[in-house]
Amino acid sequence: MSGIKIRGTGRCVPQHIVTNDDMAKIVETNDEWITTRTGIRHRHHCTGGENHTYLCTQAAKSALEKAGIRPEDIGACIVATLTADELVPAAACTLQRELGLPEDTLCFDLNAACTGFLFGLHTMECLLAASPRKYGLVLGAEVLSRILNWQDRGTCILFGDGAGAAVVEWRQEWPSIGAVLGTRGDNELLRVAGVETGEHSYIQMDGTKVFKFAVETVPHCMDQVLSKAGMTAADVDFFVFHQANARIIDLAVRKYHIPPEKYYKNIEEYGNTSAASIPLVLSELQDLGKIHSGSRVLVVGFGGGLTWGGALIEFA
Ligand code: COA
């Protein structure tokens, strides 16, 4: 035994909403195509003074407040992201300054693309076991609007900005979240160029191949999590899926006969927010009262890297 539970969640999305009709003014597309192929109607993009630091700070403050935990109680802070305002300092160090986290709080960023929040939770569970302070802050945050190719209708319509945060607590007597995580080095399916290449840092993606990868990976992760926990899908109180495409979620829902009251989609409002996607869902669910103390939540994600993973998360 020994593991983490979520104490409180928070989120922040930019105010500016970009509709499918707005996208149709930029690339050759239309509301009907985007809605039926992806389930997306809106996405939120940073404007004015909004940036990655702003989204992270608001989301983290809200999670701390809901958890009733002070910044000085935090032992580690991980920001899962691929779009921090600066490469150095890490977004987690900037957040440390904004929140007034102690200097011995271990703060760092983690890039596992859309699976980043799950990688962050697992890493935090390991870190807190060795930390003198047993509360951790895990964020998934992205400003993907800064790395979109506005001439590529196959990608620019999909992504949005946002941040989600969770304050977690570690206890010896709690079960582990039982994370199952995987990676496969591949830059053919999904790629964002880095400093070495001199290219613009745009999201480049083979959508059809990523779709195929996703529909195989999601059930694979779910089966692994359930088998590790000795549970069946019927034992799970709620299912949280990475919000990449409503059709990918619908396929999993059908395969596992998940009733409507046991899963949630917010892709219609935010599009794919990569690492922020899962914590945005968790935060909305907590506010809606759909998940609460004792709920066993199966979370599953996949993304560039390639990366994938699942875990069974409980709220304290
Ligand atoms: N508007 C209108 N038409 C579009 C379009 C758009 N925004 N984007 C692509 N098309 C066109 C294509 O050009 C193609 O036209 P053609 O048949 O004349 O060549 C047609 O629509 C079909 O394209 P295709 O890419 O096969 O569509 P799709 O059904 O696979 O849907 C995605 C495309 C991107 C929505 C889908 O593949 C997807 O969601 N993939 C997974 C992406 C993902 O999850 N990425 C994140 C991973 S974390």
Image (cartoon, rainbow, N blue to C red):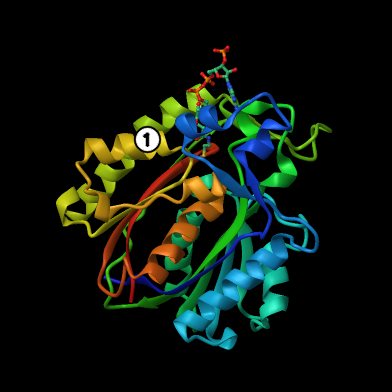
Q: Is mark 1 within 8 Å of ligand 1?
A: no
Ligand 1 image-quadrant field: top right
Within 10 angstroms of label 1, few (less than 14), some, or many (20 or more) residues? Answer: some
Q: Position of residue 124 (x, y in %)?
A: 47, 66
Q: Position of residue 60 (x, y in %)?
A: 58, 73
Between residues 223 and 22, which one lies in front from this camera angle?
Answer: 22
SS at badge 1:
helix
Q: Is residue 179 left or right of residue 93?
A: left
**Figure check: 196 above or below 141:** above
Name the quarter where the N terminus is drawn.
bottom left
Task: Give the residue drawn at x 55%, y 38%.
Answer: 304
Residue at 30 percent across and 60 percent down: it is 297
- State the image coordinates of residue 70 (x, y, percent, origin top left): 55, 87
289 versus 73 height, above or below: above
Quadrant position of the C terminus in the picture: bottom left
Side of 276 relative to 253 (left or right) = right
Q: Residue 296's x, y, as percent? A: 26, 63
Could one spot residue 181 in this view of the protein? no
Q: Specify whether residue 238 is in view.
A: yes
Number of numbered discs: 1
Q: Which residue is mark 1?
A: 217
Depicted 105 relative to depicted 125: above or below: below
Amino acid marked by disc 1: Thr
Instruction: Quadrant for residue 155, please give it.
Output: top right
